[in-house]
Amino acid sequence: MTTGGTARVDHGVTSGTFSLDGQTFDVDNNVWVVGDEAECVVIDAPHSVADILAVVGERKVTAIVCTHAHDDHVRVAPALRSRVGAPILLHPDDRPLWELTHPDQRWDRDLRDGDAIEVGGVTLRVLHTPGHAPGAVSLYAPELGCVFTGDTLFQGGPGATGRSYSDSDLIQESIRARLFTLPDETVVHTGHGADTTIGAERAALDR
Ligand SMILES: [Zn+2]
């Protein structure tokens, strides 16, 4: 748990599958919840509404922000929306991926580069970081000293770009231009697995 003023970051892990290009894999996804005692934003909606609500607790959810639309990140977004009454936010460039998972549902609001999402007295700044997915975004929280990178940057390097709708040159450009320009000490909260920092990943990639 990280605190900045009254706002904080809470974390859970939930298990399920990821499917694309006719293959299915077992995956554990991180659930990130940012907010204060009263309200919060949920970053990604993987696998299980109950697991997400266990991290949310009694707080009001003001938005469900999707880092990208791979099915392991948006699977329960519509179900969570029904449950908590919050809008789903997604970058429109991920429409083709969203429609593979939810052909009969829509997200509510488009995310755009530079958007500011306010919650619990802190700001989540939307950085469009395409490559892993065309509409992949990272969410930078300067007051909390952290960035939520989804599957764009992990501990150990860039996210996968071997499947449809991915682009390895583009993810490198996104990481260098948008993420490595953040302060070294910025904590990176990823879509899967352990935290890292911008400084550690920049040093590893330049080695
Ligand atoms: Zn992904």
Image (cartoon, grey):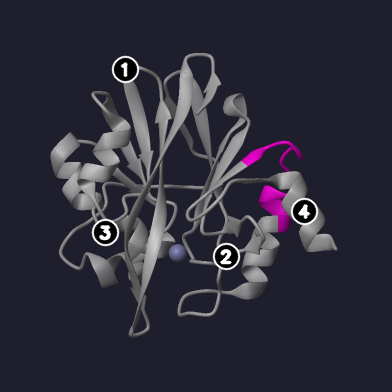
Q: How far apart are marks 3 and 4 (CA)?
A: 31 Å
In which quadrant will I find the C terminus? bottom right
**Secondary element at tag 2:** loop
Callout 1 crowding tier (Cα within 10 Å): few <14, some 14–19, many ≥20: few
Q: Earlier in the sequence, mark 3 or mark 4?
A: 3
Q: Earlier in the sequence, mark 2 or mark 3?
A: 3
Q: Mark 1 points at which residue?
A: 38
Asked where in the image residue 41 lies, by quadrant, the reply is top left
Q: Mark 4 points at which residue?
A: 202
Q: Mark 3 points at which residue?
A: 75
Disc number placed over residue 187 in the picture, else none: none
Hey, what amino acid is under mark 3? Answer: Arg
Hey, what amino acid is under mark 2? Answer: Gly
The picture quadrant for ligand 1 comes to bottom left
The image position of residue 132, as x and y in percent, is 53, 67
Q: Mark 2 points at which residue?
A: 159
In this rendering, position of residue 134 left or right of residue 156: left
Asked if the stretch drawn in magenta spans residue 118, the answer is no
Callout 4 crowding tier (Cα within 10 Å): few <14, some 14–19, many ≥20: some
- Look at the numbered discs 4 and 2 and tell me whether their residues touch, using CB distance below 8 Å: no
Q: Distance between the residues labelled 1 and 4?
A: 36 Å
Hey, what amino acid is under mark 1? Answer: Ala
Question: Which span of residues is magenta-colored?
Answer: 176-187
Q: Which of marks 2 and 1 is nearer the N terminus?
A: 1
Callout 3 crowding tier (Cα within 10 Å): few <14, some 14–19, many ≥20: many
Hey, what amino acid is under mark 4? Answer: Arg
Say which of 28 and 207 sits in front: 28
**Secondary element at tag 1:** loop
Residue shown at the point (51%, 59%) measured from the top left:
151
